[in-house]
């Protein structure tokens, strides 16, 4: 086992990460970086598949390392798109990799590519196979997860999944579902000066404030819905916009935020509860209130006794000397989709990176090497044929 982890090539891994980061790829525009990844894998001797998976504008990338012998399939999965922020080109300084996607998650994709290359070069798999997939449409609200859904529907699916998002301090067996909330409050008429009739109009600001207040009350009630490992349900408002000037009655207010829920909570009930709030505010304030609930990922939980967990933990002991505590995932990612929709356990484990969803993404190159080693070692353990 030690031999395969020692074969991870730090400089090759870093070169792969830089080559991916140097191509801007905001969500819905990952075609060029997907082409680059496909070429990297083809140059490494892999037969590359390019399934459209419902998004022909940027076909996904898939390769298989198949031993031809019986055994399970471990899937490495990553997204190639980045959030819509100003592009920062890659640079390496003092062992740190910087640039758009360094943390989220082109650095992680490079680590899983390096793990796959090492497995191929060492012929370390005793059985089974490894499937690597990479895709667009991950980051919300610009992406809707459609391409990953298409990959799963088309059969690009292993018996367990590893995802190199930036969670490294725990083994998350449970995660919340999440929806993005977008609420618009409007009134009839035109914007008016406060003293020229504006103060007599229904106030979209007061109505919006009431929506926020009732969401806050809901969040307080939701705080009682908890998971034994520590997560709670929530509703959160992060943006509110209205008005053009301090003494004008505006005709529109918008607010947005999130609603997160635990496994076992009905998504239909979540949506009905939110709609009831803004509809009642509209009726009471003389305004019109319309909202959208953009479901991004579902809640999930998997059994910590699953074999992939033991294989992963053994690999953590081998690579960095300890197992990870079982815990919860604070954010949502593609692991939610895999486990919630298929029942297949998906472990999120990536580098100790910083700056995700900012223009200051950074990751230690040594962390990318560590992740590649864990992935390669887990594959060797998991893909063995088990006794009948």
Image: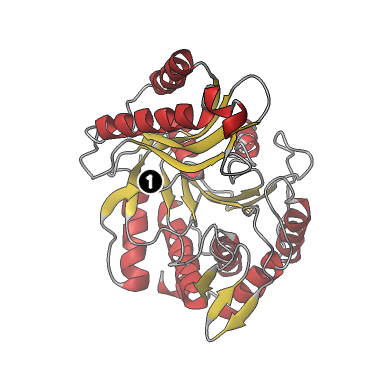
- Name of the residue lying farthest toward the top: 283
- Where, by quadrant of the figure, is residue 147 drawn? top right
Q: Which residue is mark 1?
A: 386
How many numbered marks are there? 1
**In the picture provided, is 203 more to the left or to the right than 82?**
left
Q: Position of residue 204 (x, y in %)?
A: 53, 28
Q: Relative to the observer, which residue lies in front, 233 or 93?
A: 233
Residue at image x 35%, y 55%?
311
In this picture, residue 224 sits left or right of residue 60: left
**Element at badge 1?**
loop
How is the protein colored in the picture?
A: secondary structure
Instruction: Please report the residue visible at 63 percent of the width from the left and 19 percent of the height from the top.
Output: 188
Towards the viewer: 50 or 283: 283
Q: Can you say whether 333 is above or below 87 in the image?
A: above
Q: Quick one: 265 or 127, which is closer to the camera?
A: 265
Looking at the image, which residue sits at the far front?
A: 195
* Rendered location of residue 216, percent (x, y): 33, 34
Image quarter of the N terminus: bottom left
377 lies above or below 285? below
Q: Position of residue 24 (x, y in %)?
A: 73, 60
**Quadrant of the rendering where the C terminus is positioned:** top left
Residue 169's place in the image compared with 226, above or below, is: below
Q: Percent from the top left, x then y, of residue 222?
A: 28, 32
Up/down of 30 relative to 283, above or below: below
**Is residue 384 at least partly visible in the picture?**
no
Mark 1 neighbour class, 10 Å CA radius: few under 14, some 14 to 19, many 20 or more: few
Q: Is residue 340 left or right of residue 227?
A: right
Please indicate, yes or no, whether residue 262 appears anywhere in the rendered image. yes
In the image, what residue occupies the spot 45% across and 71% down?
A: 370
């Amino acid at each position: 086992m030690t031999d395969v982890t020692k074969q991870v090539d730090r400089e090759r891994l870093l070169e792969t990460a830089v080559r991916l980061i140097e191509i801007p790829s905001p969500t819905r525009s990952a075609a060029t970086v997907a082409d680059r990844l496909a070429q990297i894998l083809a140059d490494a001797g892999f037969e590359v598949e390019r399934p459209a998976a419902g998004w022909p504008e940027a076909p996904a990338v898939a390769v298989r390392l198949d031993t031809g012998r019986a055994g399970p399939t471990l899937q490495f999965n990553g997204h190639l798109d980045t959030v819509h922020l100003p592009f920062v080109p890659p640079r390496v300084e003092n062992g740190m990799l910087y640039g758009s996607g360094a943390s989220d998650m082109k650095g992680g994709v490079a680590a899983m590519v390096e793990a796959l290359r090492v497995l191929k070069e060492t012929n370390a798999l005793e059985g089974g196979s490894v499937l690597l997939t990479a895709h667009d449409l991950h980051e919300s609200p610009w992406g809707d997860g459609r391409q990953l859904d298409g990959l799963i529907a088309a059969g690009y699916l292993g018996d367990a999944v590893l995802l190199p998002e930036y969670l490294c301090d725990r083994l998350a067996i449970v995660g919340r579902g999440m929806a993005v909330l977008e609420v618009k409050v409007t009134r009839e008429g035109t914007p008016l000066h406060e003293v020229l009739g504006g103060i007599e109009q229904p106030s979209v600001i007061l109505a919006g404030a009431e929506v926020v207040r009732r969401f806050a009350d809901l969040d307080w009630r939701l705080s009682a819905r908890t998971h034994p490992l520590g997560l709670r349900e929530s509703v959160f408002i992060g943006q509110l916009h209205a008005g053009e000037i301090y003494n004008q009655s505006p005709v529109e207010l918008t607010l947005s935020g999130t609603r997160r829920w635990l496994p076992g909570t009905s998504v239909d009930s979540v949506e009905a509860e939110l709609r009831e709030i803004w509809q009642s505010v509209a009726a009471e304030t003389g305004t019109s209130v319309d909202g959208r609930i953009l479901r991004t990922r579902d809640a999930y939980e998997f059994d910590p006794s699953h074999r992939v967990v033991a294989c992963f933990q053994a690999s953590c002991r081998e690579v960095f000397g300890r197992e990870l505590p079982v815990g919860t995932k604070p954010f949502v990612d593609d692991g939610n989709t895999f486990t919630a929709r298929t029942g297949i356990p998906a472990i999120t484990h990536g580098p100790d990176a910083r700056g995700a969803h900012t223009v200051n993404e950074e990751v230690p190159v040594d962390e990318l090497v560590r992740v590649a080693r864990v992935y390669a070692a887990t594959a060797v353990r998991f893909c063995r044929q088990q006794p009948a």
